[in-house]
Structures are given as C-alpha cells and as structure tokens.
Image: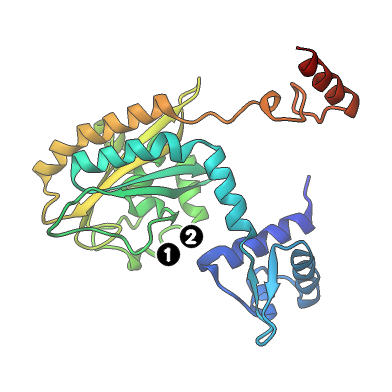
C-alpha cells in the first residue's frame, strides 16, 4: 500500500542528505518531480518535526543533525562498532592496507567503517570513507552482486543508474551488462571480488561477502584497497586468503539486533505493555 506523503518526505530527506547540502525550494521540487506548493507543505512539516531547517538569509532548506544523531544511535545499538571495528582494525594491520566494511541496505551497499593499515610510504586514502558503494565499479560491489541471482544483480546496478556514469571511474571499469555478468561468474569461482584500476585509477581492491543467519544471506562485505604499484597480482594472491578469512570471522560475529521482548516497555510480540502489565512487573521485582 502506497503512502505518498511519507514517501515524499523520505525522498526530501534522502535528497538533502546527499552531500549534506542545502537547496532552494524550486530545486527540491524539480528533483522529486513535485509541485512547489506540495514540496513547500512537506518541507514545512519536516521543519515543524525538527528534521529540517530553513536558512533565514537564503531561504534554502537543509537537514538538521537529528538524522545524524538517530543514525549514530542505531549504529551503536546494532553492535557494529563494538563487534566489528576491532576485527577491521586487526585486519587492516595484518594486510598493511586500507580496509573497509560495507553493509547491505536494500538494493545497495553502504560503507560504514574503515581502518588504515599502511604505516608509511605510499598510502591509499579515499576521498570519501562512507556512503553508497558503486556496485559495478568496485570489488566490494562485485563481491555482493556475485551472491545474488544474475537478474537481481543487474536490477540493483540499474537502480544506481546503470553504466551511465562509468566515465567518472578508472580505465578498466565495467561498461556493459555482459561484462558485468562475466565478471560476477569469475568472482564466484575465485571466492572474492577484484578491481584493478576500476573504482579509481591506480588503485586495486579485494573484497569478500559476509554471510549471516540461517539462510546465510549476504549482510555485508569486507575489503582492502591499496596503490596498484604495491597491490600487484602476486600481492593479491597473498592477501586474498586474509580477506576471505576476515569475512568468515565477521559472519560468525555479525551483530544480532535485540529481540522485541528485551526492549523495556514491550511484550514478547513487540507490542507496548499496558500500564497494568508494567506495574505488575515492577511490583514483582520489588517483591523479589
């Protein structure tokens, strides 16, 4: 069932979150194909609720820090920083390269954690350490797509705009569906994703999928990247077992969200307890 106001409010939040930018009303309306009057009403609602604010001088709209705070609260509550960051730190140190962790978010991957393992000399440090992963241009994206049905993999790439932005990446980047499917088959055979001069010129990356749960669904990826001058084919062969081992370790440690029954004020089905239920529980605790 479609809920257009909610969908459009979320669309505005996503638009303003991209680059943490501020935008005039007209650009927001055009970007979401909305009439200005409708966009203005939705923005007024977001401002009233504290999700957005309007600059008094320019009239431009931007998000408040509420989304960032909420996201940080969720990130900490998920257990990812406590459980996964130490593994990523150790992994980066062992490989002596830049390591990253990405998680599956619907039809995309998002980088959420990283660690620099290179101690000196030529270092690889991406301009952005978080954000959405370019699926067809990265070892990280290939590692995830290779675990999906081919049609689903192609659809996910299409949702990111397909290969229309291939020119912004490295000289070896994939530029067609046929080339993508061929590379995904190769990724499956070797057990890890690989990118030579694809996401960025002069950079080589290796990535492996993290699987969790009873159905072993892919929940994320772990990767390392470094200068191609150092990440030669022999170096890739040396490091690829470490990448797959790290992915296997994270698969066994992957955080599990608390069940609803562990949240104060909720019953076993995740419903709010009545005041009477909560008072009874409190009284029993005192009696104990």
Q: Nearer the viewer, residue 152 or 273?
A: 273
Lateral position of residue 243 relative to residue 283, left or right: left
Q: Secondary structure at mark 1?
A: loop
Lateral position of residue 236 relative to residue 257, left or right: left
**For the view shown, which residue lies furthest in the top direction?**
288
- Vertical side of 214 occupied by 173: above or below: below
Question: Is residue 148 something one can see in this rendering?
Answer: no
Question: Is residue 168 something one can see in this rendering?
Answer: yes
Lateral position of residue 108 relative to residue 30, left or right: left
Residue 262 sits in quarter: top right
- Vertical side of 190 occupied by 196: above or below: below
The label number, if any, that marks residue 164 in the structure image: 1
Where does the image place residue 212, in percent across and percent down from the top left? 46, 27
**For the view shown, which residue lies furthest in the front direction?**
287
Where does the image place residue 76, in percent across and percent down from the top left? 53, 42
Lateral position of residue 277 relative to residue 236, left or right: right
At a point 61% along the width and 28% down the height, the residue shown is 258
Where does the image place residue 86, in percent across and percent down from the top left? 35, 37
The label number, if any, that marks residue 105 in the structure image: none
Where does the image place residue 81, in percent across and percent down from the top left? 45, 41
Judging by the rendered image, the residue that carries numbered circle 2 is 161
Q: Quadrant of the N terminus?
A: top right
Q: Nearer the viewer, residue 54 or 8?
A: 54
* Label 1 with label 2: CB-CB less than 8 Å: yes
At a point 64% along the width and 59% down the height, the residue shown is 66
Could you tell me how far apart the alpha carbons at marks 1 and 2 are, in whole angstroms?
6 Å
- Vertical side of 12 occupied by 235: above or below: above
Residue 288 sits in quarter: top right
């Amino acid at each position: 069932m479609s809920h257009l106001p909610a969908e459009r409010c979320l669309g505005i939040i996503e638009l303003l979150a991209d680059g943490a930018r501020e935008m005039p009303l007209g650009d927001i309306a055009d970007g979401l194909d909305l009439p200005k009057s409708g966009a203005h009403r939705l923005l007024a609602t977001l401002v009233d609720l504290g999700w957005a604010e309007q600059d008094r001088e320019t009239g431009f709209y931007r998000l408040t820090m509420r989304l960032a705070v909420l996201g940080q609260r969720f990130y900490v509550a998920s257990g990812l920083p406590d459980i996964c960051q130490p593994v990523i730190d150790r992994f980066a140190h062992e490989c002596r390269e830049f390591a990253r962790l990405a998680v599956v978010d619907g039809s995309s991957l998002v980088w959420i954690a990283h660690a620099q393992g290179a101690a000196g000399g030529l270092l690889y440090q991406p301009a952005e350490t978080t954000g959405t992963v370019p699926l067809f241009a990265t070892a990280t994206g290939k590692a995830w797509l290779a675990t999906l049905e081919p049609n689903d993999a192609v659809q996910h790439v299409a949702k990111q705009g397909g290969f229309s932005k291939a020119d912004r990446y490295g000289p070896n980047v994939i530029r067609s569906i046929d080339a993508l499917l061929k590379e995904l088959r190769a990724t499956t055979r070797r057990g890890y994703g690989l990118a030579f001069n694809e996401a960025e010129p002069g950079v080589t990356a290796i990535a492996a999928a993290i699987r969790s749960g009873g159905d072993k669904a892919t929940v994320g990826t772990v990767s390392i990247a470094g200068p191609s001058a150092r990440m030669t084919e022999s170096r890739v062969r040396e490091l690829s077992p470490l990448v797959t081992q790290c992915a296997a370790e994270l698969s066994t440690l992957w955080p599990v969200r608390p069940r609803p029954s562990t949240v104060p004020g909720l019953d076993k089905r995740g419903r709010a307890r009545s005041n009477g239920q909560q008072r009874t529980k409190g009284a029993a605790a005192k009696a104990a």
